[in-house]
Image (cartoon, helix red, strand yellow):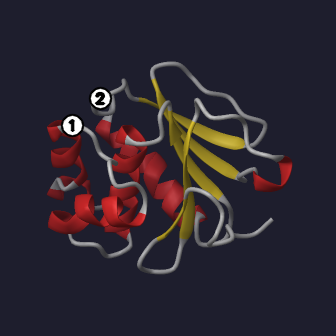
């Protein structure tokens, strides 16, 4: 399948050219030609798809249950985004998804102190919803 078309809904182009898609799980399922090859799903219940995926236990408006598991899964998503369709999704597609995309932007070279604004400018204006999520996205200990 390859990488995402830059014009597809929710697709974010990281500074190093990798592309990924942010999505709300509440939205209807993607059309067959818009399905990812790998997904990271953020929520309190395991989310299963027909494609390869990882689940990160992460309650709405909170932080991941395990920082190390979240960083490992997001690192895998970042690496895969170089050659395949990767999506990051949570219930509404803004808070947890935006926070995760900020971390991926940091892997791509965005400085920690600019990560939140970068996501809001390049993904969703209201991404990353809580002060805790903002602190987490810019935390220096998340660098791989």
> Residue beneath label 1, please?
130
The number of discs equals 2
Is 99 placed left or right of 30 in the picture? left
Image quadrant containing the C terminus? bottom left
Tag 1 or tag 2, which sits nearer the N-term?
2
* Residue 12 in the image, given as x and y percentages of width and height: 50, 65
Look at the image and tell me in which quarter the N terminus lies: bottom right
10 to 12, vertically: above or below: above
Element assignment for label 2: loop
Query: In this rendering, would 95 be left or right of 141?
Result: right
**Residue farthest along the top direction in this orientation:** 45
Which residue lies at the image location 33% right of the left edge and 33% below the top edge? 64
State yes or no: discs 2 and 1 in contact (Cβ < 8 Å): yes
Name which quarter of the figure residue 49 lies in.
top right
21 lies left or right of 142:
right
Foreground residue, 97 or 121? 121
Q: Quadrant of residue 53?
A: top right
Q: Position of residue 33 (x, y in %)?
A: 83, 55
Q: Which mark is residue 5?
A: none
Q: Residue 130 location in percent, x, y?
A: 21, 37
Mark 2 Cα within 10 Å, few/some/many (few <14, many 20+)? some
Residue at screen point 24% across, 63% down = 117
Rounded to the nearest angstrom, the CA distance separating label 2 from label 1 is 6 Å
Q: Is 28 on the left-hand or right-hand side of 92?
A: right
Disc 1 packing (10 Å; few <14; some 14–19; many ≥20): some
In this figure, which residue is indicated by the disc labeled 2? 61
SS at mark 1 in the image? loop
Above or below residue 51? Residue 5 is below
Residue at 58%, 33% (x, y): give it.
25
- Residue 30 point in image, percent of width and height: 74, 44
Outermost front residue: 125
């Amino acid at each position: 399948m390859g990488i995402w078309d830059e014009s597809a809904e929710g697709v974010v182009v990281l500074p190093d050219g990798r592309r990924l898609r942010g999505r709300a799980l509440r939205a209807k399922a993607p059309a067959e030609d818009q399905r990812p090859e790998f997904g990271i799903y953020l929520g309190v219940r395991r989310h299963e798809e027909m494609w390869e995926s990882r689940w990160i236990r992460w309650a709405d408006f909170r932080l991941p249950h395990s920082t190390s598991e979240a960083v490992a899964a997001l690192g895998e998503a970042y690496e895969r985004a170089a050659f395949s369709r990767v999506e990051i999704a949570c219930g509404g597609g803004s808070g947890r998804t935006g926070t995760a995309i900020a971390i991926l932007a940091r892997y791509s070279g965005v400085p920690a102190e600019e990560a939140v604004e970068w996501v809001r400018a390049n993904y969703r204006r209201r991404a990353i919803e809580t002060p805790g999520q903002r602190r987490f996205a810019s935390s220096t200990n998340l660098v791989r």
